[in-house]
Amino acid sequence: MTNDPFSAAASLDELLTRTQQALSAMRSRAAEHPDGAPGELLRAEGAAADGRIRAVAVQGGRLESVTVDPALAGESIEALCGHLVSAVNAALTELDARVSASAQADVDALAARLGGMPEQSARDMERFGRAMEGVAARIRRDGAGSGAARPA
């Protein structure tokens, strides 16, 4: 183990860089993709009227599609609208659960990646402190031998 203060500072800098990279990766995965690339957005489906009305919601709270079975053509518009609201709400509820689960997985992954950060940081700061003590001792030693005036 070295007492070089620059080495300890570099280790701390590397640790902070890894932390920033992990957070950046989390943000980019959580961000909604403006082009709506289908493979990258979370999606969920909700159904109503015994599955005859289906709604698909995608990450960002958007409705991707609604499918209505033509057999419901004889239903009143009020009943259809009620079923449609139920299907969309079910899809949004499921989507919210999936987004929450994904966010929790991201937090768990970040925690795992950074789990050793406090111990590593403490070791680096201890090493940095020892190096600074060595520098101070050299300054005292070199200053005492040179006859330089010391502050009172």
Image (spheres, grey):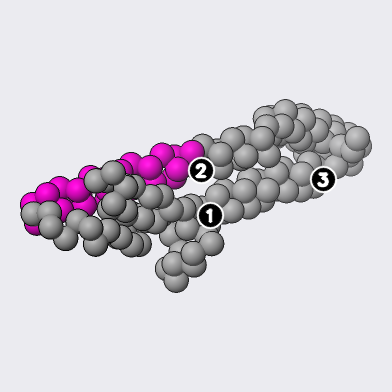
Q: Secondary structure at mark 2?
A: helix
The 10 Å Cα crowd at callout 1, few under 14, some 14 to 19, many 20 or more, is some
The 10 Å Cα crowd at callout 2, few under 14, some 14 to 19, many 20 or more, is some
Label 3 belongs to which residue?
7
Residue 7: % across, % down: 82, 45
Disc with the residue nearer the chain's start (2 vs 1): 1
How much space separates mark 3 and mark 2, taking CA atoms? 37 Å
The 10 Å Cα crowd at callout 3, few under 14, some 14 to 19, many 20 or more, is some
Indicate the amino acid at tag 1: Arg
Disc with the residue nearer the chain's start (3 vs 2): 3
How much space separates mark 2 and mark 1, taking CA atoms? 9 Å
Check residue 2 for magenta coloring: no
How much space separates mark 3 and mark 1, taking CA atoms? 33 Å
Compare residues 10 and 142 and report the one nearer the observer. Answer: 10
User: For this view, does 49 lie left or right of residue 105?
Assistant: left
Compare residues 74 and 139 and report the one nearer the observer. Answer: 74
Disc with the residue nearer the chain's start (3 vs 1): 3
Residue 102: % across, % down: 51, 43
Indicate the amino acid at tag 2: Ser
Q: Give the answer, above or below, for where 36 lies relative to 29.
A: below
Indicate the amino acid at tag 3: Ser
